[in-house]
Amino acid sequence: HLPGRRGGRLVALNDETGRGLEPVCAPGAHPQREPVEIPDRAFGGAVALFKALSDERRLRTLAFLSEGEACGSEIAAIFDEPLSTVSHRMKLLETAGLVARRRAGRHVYFRLLDDHVFSLVREALEHAQE
């Protein structure tokens, strides 16, 4: 049986029908808790952030940038990809607020936006190795 919600109560769900069988916990069995006080926009932003991180090449690119700023053509060479592919990836990472760009003549350089991004990437990779 899978737990689910019905009318605000936790119930056991029948695997086949999805209909509630019985309450899992009696009303009042647990102390009343308030929901987490985090704005909805923060959850939306976090979802967008994790979507941007959910691709291995994007995550590898961020790990590469954790070592310092890099030119788009350098990133393309490292990953053996066309510059157009790297450009598209970097635009997505920039839109997600993970990288910043600067132009110097014909070159475009990318870096992690801030230390939060560095920490997030490092923690994710460390967690995955546990």
Image (cartoon, rainbow, N blue to C red):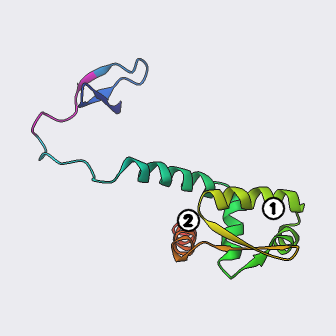
Percent across and percent down for residue 24 are 22, 33
Q: Residue furthest bottom?
A: 68
Q: Which mark is residue 128?
A: 2
The quarter of the rendered structure image containing the N terminus is top left
- Nearest the viewer among 1 and 76 is 76
| Residue at 51% from the left image edge and 72% from the top image edge | 116
Q: Residues within 10 Å of mark 2 (few under 14, many from 20)?
A: few
Q: Residues within 10 Å of mark 1 (few under 14, many from 20)?
A: many
Position of 78 with respect to 18 (left or right) is right
- Examine the residues drawn in magenta and state their main secondary structure: loop
- Nearest the viewer among 78 and 37 is 37
| Residue at 88% from the left image edge and 62% from the top image edge | 83
Percent across and percent down for residue 53 are 61, 58
User: Which stretch appears magenta?
Assistant: 21-28
Position of 113 with respect to 23 (left or right) is right
Position of 121 with respect to 102 (left or right) is left
Give the mark, 2 or 1, whose residue is nearer the N terminus. 1
